[in-house]
Image (cartoon, rainbow, N blue to C red):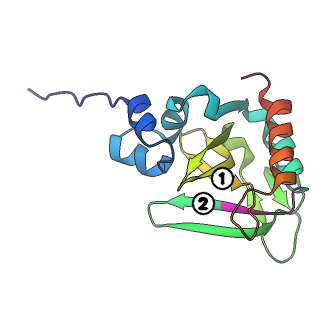
Amino acid sequence: MQVAAATPDLPSILAADPGAIVETLAKEHGVTAHAVVEALPAAMRRFAPAGAFSDAMKDIAGWGEVTLIVHTDDGIMEFTGTIPPGEVGRGYFNLMARTGFHGHLRHERCAGLAFMERPFMGRLSASVLFLNIDGGIMFKVFVGRDEKRELLADQLAKFRALTERLAGGG
């Protein structure tokens, strides 16, 4: 007889460590990254529908230097710089740049966006997580920081305005 694994108490785990790395927590507890984000206190996360993908990317392209992270089992890749404008064509959201960050994103695999403000390593962090249809994270875009490692006030304001526009009141 096989014993079913206990369902992790993610809200309690996150209450103890609200800055835990989402992908790591998901892997450790056998749940999706989306489930981890949903377990965060409501004040730390808000969701927008998949249809907001293009609007979010177009807005982020105007923020200036941000950090984009792709976290896989094989590594954590970070890009710090400006996100180029993009448009949908031939089945992809195409980032329109010849150098720097560019490429073709499978926007139709996006299941929704999570806007998160929470502590990380003793400081406030603000990020947009692009959630995929498998419950994972396609990539994350973090509000930039200044030379004192504080969030850039103008970007934080743009992040919050985008959150309000796409995720509404919660």
The picture quadrant where one finds residue 7 is top left
Residue 153, placed above or below residue 36: below
Is 93 positioned to the left or the right of 74 in the image?
A: right
Residue 34, placed above or below residue 149: above
Question: Which region shows up in magenta?
Answer: 63-68
Q: Which residue lies furthest to the top in this view?
A: 169
Please name the residue shown 65% across and 50% down the image.
125
Q: Where is residue 156 in the image (x, y as percent from the top left)?
A: 80, 48
Q: Mark 1 points at which residue?
A: 140
Please tell me whether residue 134 belongs to the stretch shown in magenta. no
Q: Name the kind of residue labelled 2 in the image.
A: Val
Crowd around label 2: few <14 · some 14–19 · many ≥20 (10 Å): some
Residue 140, placed above or below residue 148: above
Q: Mark 2 points at which residue?
A: 70
Crowd around label 1: few <14 · some 14–19 · many ≥20 (10 Å): some
| Residue 13 in sight in this render | yes
Q: Where is residue 114 in the image (x, y as percent from the top left)?
A: 66, 38
Q: Name the kind of residue labelled 1 in the image.
A: Lys
Q: Is mark 1 on a helix, strand or loop?
A: strand
* Marks 1 and 2 in Cβ contact (< 8 Å): yes
